[in-house]
Image: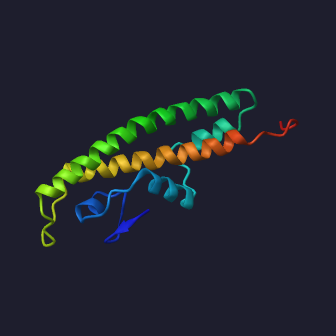
Amino acid sequence: MTKHFEYSSGHPWYYVLGGAVLFPRQIVNDVHNRGYRGYAASDIVAADALSEPKRSRMLRDYREKFRDDLKRDLSRYRQCANALRSWREHHALNHNDPECADVHTNISLKHNHLYNDFAHLIWLEELLSRQRDLFDL
């Protein structure tokens, strides 16, 4: 994750201290580089262990769910980024006594939602592109 004053981009204080709002592509690249699997990793592992055709159906259902989540989270992330930009225009950063406001918490949480959405989708695409051995039991 991108760091600013030792805080990662998923932490509110990263934004309080002036950290940049990341583009979705930067978040995807970070997820890819770290190999993160997301909070639902154990559920995805369980679905991948199922026999066909149930395996493919479950993985596709997860992919659809996380795509829907991603669309919703991207829209909200944009709103949070705009709110942070506006907040920064009207509030000077006081390095002696910085203030963590809801706007900082909101964008950090939405960043983390995107991080998980991307992690799940990257992994699901890998799993769905891999054909199991015909004699795999």
On the picture, is 44 further left or further right than 93?
right
Q: Name the residue: 71% across, 33% down.
A: 50
Q: Tell me, what colour scheme is on the image?
A: rainbow
Q: Which of 121 and 136 is in front in this view?
A: 121
On the picture, is 129 further left or further right than 71?
right
Say above or below: 114 vs 100. Answer: above
| Quadrant of res 131 | top right
Instruction: Give coordinates of residue 103: x percent, y percent.
Output: 22, 50
On the picture, is 46 further left or further right than 85?
right
Which quadrant would the C terminus be assigned to in this image? top right
On the picture, is 64 further left or further right than 103?
right
Instruction: Give coordinates of residue 51: x percent, y percent.
Output: 75, 31
User: Disc count in the image?
Assistant: 0
Q: Nearer the viewer, residue 78 or 105?
A: 78
Q: Name the residue: 53% across, 48% down.
A: 119
| Quadrant of res 17 | bottom left
Q: Name the residue: 54% across, 44% down.
A: 120
Which quadrant would the N terminus be assigned to in this image? bottom left
Instruction: Give coordinates of residue 87: x percent, y percent.
Output: 17, 53
Say above or below: 58 vs 33. Answer: above
Q: Name the residue: 88% across, 36% down.
A: 135
